[in-house]
């Protein structure tokens, strides 16, 4: 009888361990869960954006709302209040501040600028082919990273908090050089 009880206990432990292992999601499954959560949702966020032009670096604080398509510059102070409206219908970007227009300059041959980086990243999260995904941990937070091909020589990598699915940081690189770095906060998905 004792032998049967021990055998039964051993089998229960083995099945318990097996079920724990089999319920662990792959990075690909978690990446797809993140994408599903973000699709057909309104996303609002604040981003600390660093644009590296090689010979100069600019830091911006931007807010972005996918529903309105409006990006607002919060910093640097000299540009605070500047708004950018991105229209998917006619593929246009209009930068406005007291009626003036400003060209921020392109970071890639495809015309990526610091202003267009946020809508481009969100587009990558929602629709682009995922070329790689993986898990990573840093400072006690677990992430799923999603890498997409924006064009022939432009790659984006975005890290999402595994527990919430919210974007935490992102990079856009061209020819191996990181030209945009973003750190996200105040993320809401509705």
Image: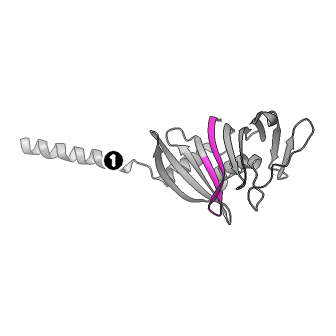
Magenta range is: 170-190
- Total number of numbered discs in the rendering: 1
Where is residue 5, by image quadrant? top left
Assess disc 1: are there few (<14), some (14-19) or many (≥20) residues with their C-alpha within 10 Å of its C-alpha: few
- Residue 123 lies, in percent from the top left, at 69, 51
Residue drawn 77% across and 37% down? 73
Residue drawn 56% across and 47% down? 159
- Residue 175 lies, in percent from the top left, at 65, 64
- Residue 120 lies, in percent from the top left, at 71, 51
Residue drawn 23% across and 44% down? 13
Residue drawn 81% across and 42% down? 84
Q: Residue furthest right?
A: 99
In screen coordinates, is 97 left or right of 126?
right
Q: Is residue 102 magenta?
A: no
Label 1: element kind: helix
Where is residue 63, by image quadrant? top right
Q: Which one is nearer the viewer's eye here, 139 or 42?
A: 139
In screen coordinates, is 174 left or right of 98?
left
| Rendered-image quadrant of the N terminus | top left
Q: Is residue 103 visible?
A: yes
Q: Which one is nearer the viewer's eye here, 143 or 9?
A: 143
| Rendered-image quadrant of the C terminus | top right
Instruction: Please name the residue that numbered disc 1 is placed on.
Output: 19
In screen coordinates, is 161 left or right of 179?
left
Is most of the magenta stretch helix, strand or loop?
strand
Q: Is residue 175 magenta?
A: yes
């Amino acid at each position: 009888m004792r032998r049967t009880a021990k055998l039964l206990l051993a089998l229960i432990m083995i099945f318990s361990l097996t079920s724990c292992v089999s319920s662990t999601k792959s990075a690909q499954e978690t990446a797809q869960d993140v994408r599903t959560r973000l699709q057909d949702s309104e996303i609002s966020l604040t981003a600390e954006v660093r644009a590296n032009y090689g010979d100069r670096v600019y830091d911006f604080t931007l807010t972005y709302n996918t529903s309105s398509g409006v990006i607002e510059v919060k910093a640097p102070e000299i540009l605070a209040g500047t708004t950018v409206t991105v229209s998917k219908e006619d593929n246009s970007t209009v930068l406005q501040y007291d009626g003036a227009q400003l060209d921020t300059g392109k970071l890639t041959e495809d015309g990526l600028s610091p202003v267009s980086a946020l809508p481009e990243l969100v587009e990558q999260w929602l629709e682009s082919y995922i070329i790689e995904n993986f898990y990573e941990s840093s400072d006690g937070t677990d992430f799923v990273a999603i890498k997409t091909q924006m064009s022939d020589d432009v790659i984006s990598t975005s890290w999402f908090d595994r527990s919430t699915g919210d974007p935490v940081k992102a990079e856009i690189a061209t020819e191996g050089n990181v030209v945009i770095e973003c750190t996200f906060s105040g993320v809401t998905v509705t």
